[in-house]
Amino acid sequence: LTHSLKLYQASFIVHVSLLSYFFIMSNSKPKVSFDEVEILEFNYVLGDNPGVSSGAPIALGDELRNTITLEVDYYEKARGKRKNRKKLTIPVHERAQILMKQGYSLEAIAAATLEADNISRERMMSANKQNWDKVNEVSERFSRLFTKALQRKRSEPQKSTMAAHSA
């Protein structure tokens, strides 16, 4: 069971079933109780998410391969410690191996990798452009305010000089 709970080996989605849930009112706070966890195992497919750091994106397919139902207490004991975010990533070479086992060619994997890299690069350029747009906007606002302040300063001495001459 332990190996089937590793995302990169079994490709699953954990679905907590509400087969027996109930609300208990105590201290005015509702509580929910679950008695089972249903694990749905799907196939892997070549993904399209450009958020990968490198390599081909991978995703869960729509082919349901297996379903496992476990008691929540047993699942909690068997699953082990929670992994940190970095340990949840699948290394590039493992993703490539998984995709090849699913029948994808090296050419398809390489093409998906290039596409993800291009989209990621375009997003970075767009984000950088937006940052510069904000800097330019702030700069233009400051320039307009500064120009108006200078114009007011220049016109004030003229008014006071005129008032002194007319008196």
Image (spheres, rainbow, N blue to C red):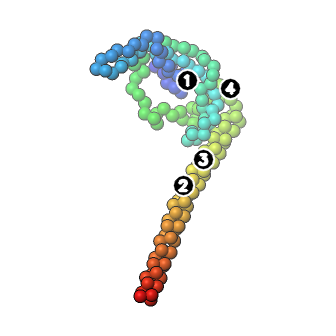
Rendering quarter of residue 81:
top left
Sequence-first tag of 1 and 2: 1
Identify the residue under disc 1. 11
Q: Nearer the viewer, mark 2 or mark 3?
A: 2
Label 3: state its secondary structure: helix
Name the quadrant of the C terminus.
Answer: bottom left
> Mark 2: which amino acid?
Asn
Quote the CA–CA distance across marks 1 and 2.
Answer: 38 Å
**x and y percentages locating residue 85 in the rendered image:** 45, 35
Horizontal side of residue 165 vs 111, given as left or right: left
**x and y percentages locating residue 146 in the rendered image:** 49, 70
Sequence-first tag of 2 and 3: 3
Identify the residue under disc 2. 131
Residue located farthest toward the left when viewing the structure as drawn:
27
Residue 51 visible somewhere in the drawing:
yes
Rendering quarter of residue 113:
top right
**x and y percentages locating residue 132 in the rendered image:** 56, 58
Label 2: state its secondary structure: helix
Q: Nearer the viewer, mark 4 or mark 1?
A: 1
Residue 161 visible somewhere in the drawing:
no
Sequence-first tag of 4 and 2: 4
Quote the CA–CA distance across marks 4 and 1.
Answer: 16 Å
Sequence-first tag of 4 and 1: 1
Identify the residue under disc 4. 103
Residue located farthest toward the top when viewing the structure as drawn:
20
Quote the CA–CA distance across marks 4 and 2.
Answer: 42 Å
**In the rendered image, the vertical position of residue 100 relative to residue 40, given as above or below:** below
